[in-house]
Image: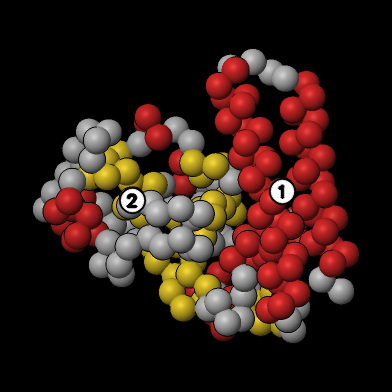
């Protein structure tokens, strides 16, 4: 069935243009404080460059996150620079949603987070994002345009079944990344497995939703 994204979300957090200074505060730059996630921290389904991120204290967090906490099942998506990178929240995470990043919270009676997360990583969805994007030097999408994008979703039962496979695949990918990070070497076999799992994910998405 076809839906606009607006029809299947209960919340989109979007703090475009917000800065600590506008709240009369500032970043702490203390890694023991609360991480501020921006577009530069999301890539290939991972949170990266956390050592280069900003941090805020509890007072900043309370003033900034006026829509509430990040929850398991939420999806973070970059709105520009780069556009369309995403990260699924799979365990509790307390963070500040910073620049150029949307938080998408789905209506779980209509959309399964794992299925939708894999859907938005597909080339087909990326093309829809670009079609709604604006800008020349920096390409980005506004929240009102994101909400207009049409997605095709099978029944919730089918979504959950497919989503389970994506979850297993994603867990293997994350394990592969952890192994590579710990070894700090390029392992040809693990890299090949990583690429095969990504290809398998897209093939499942194409063939199992019909």
Residue 186: x and y in percent read 69, 18
Q: Nearer the viewer, residue 99 or 32?
A: 32
Tally the marks.
Answer: 2
According to the image, label 2 marks what residue? 95
Q: Nearer the viewer, residue 90 or 39?
A: 90
Residue 19: x and y in percent read 25, 52
Q: Indicate which disc, 1 or 2, sits on the residue closer to the N terminus.
A: 2
Left or right: 180 as drawn, with respect to 64: right
Circle 2: element type: strand
Marking on residue 1: none
Residue 38: x and y in percent read 41, 47
Left or right: 145 as drawn, with respect to 190: left
According to the image, label 1 marks what residue? 169
**Quadrant location of the N terminus in the rendered image:** bottom right
Tell me if mark 2 has few (under 14), some (14-19) or many (20+) residues whose alpha carbon lies within 10 angstroms of its own. Answer: some
Q: Residue at x 69, y 63 (%)?
A: 163
Circle 1: element type: helix
Callout 1–callout 2 Cβ contact below 8 Å: no
Residue 43: x and y in percent read 56, 42
């Amino acid at each position: 069935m076809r839906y606009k994204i607006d029809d299947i979300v209960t919340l989109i957090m979007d703090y475009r243009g917000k800065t600590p200074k506008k709240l009369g505060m500032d970043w702490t730059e203390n890694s023991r404080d609360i991480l501020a996630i921006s577009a530069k921290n999301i890539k290939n389904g991972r949170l990266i460059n956390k050592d280069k991120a900003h941090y805020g204290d509890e007072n900043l967090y309370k003033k900034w996150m006026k829509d509430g906490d990040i929850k398991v099942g939420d999806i973070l998506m970059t709105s520009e620079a780069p556009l369309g990178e995403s990260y699924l929240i799979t365990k509790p995470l307390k963070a500040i949603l910073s620049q150029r990043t949307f938080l998408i919270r789905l209506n779980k009676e209509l959309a399964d987070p794992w299925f939708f997360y894999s859907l938005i990583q597909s080339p087909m969805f990326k093309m829809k994002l670009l079609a709604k994007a604006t800008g020349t030097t920096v390409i980005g999408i506004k929240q009102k345009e994101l909400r207009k994008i049409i997605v095709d979703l099978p029944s919730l039962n089918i979504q959950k079944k497919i989503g389970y496979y994506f979850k297993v695949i994603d867990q293997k990918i994350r394990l592969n990344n952890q192994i590579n990070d710990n070894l700090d070497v390029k392992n040809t076999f693990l890299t090949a497995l990583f690429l095969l799992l990504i290809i398998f994910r897209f093939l499942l998405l194409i063939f199992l939703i019909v």
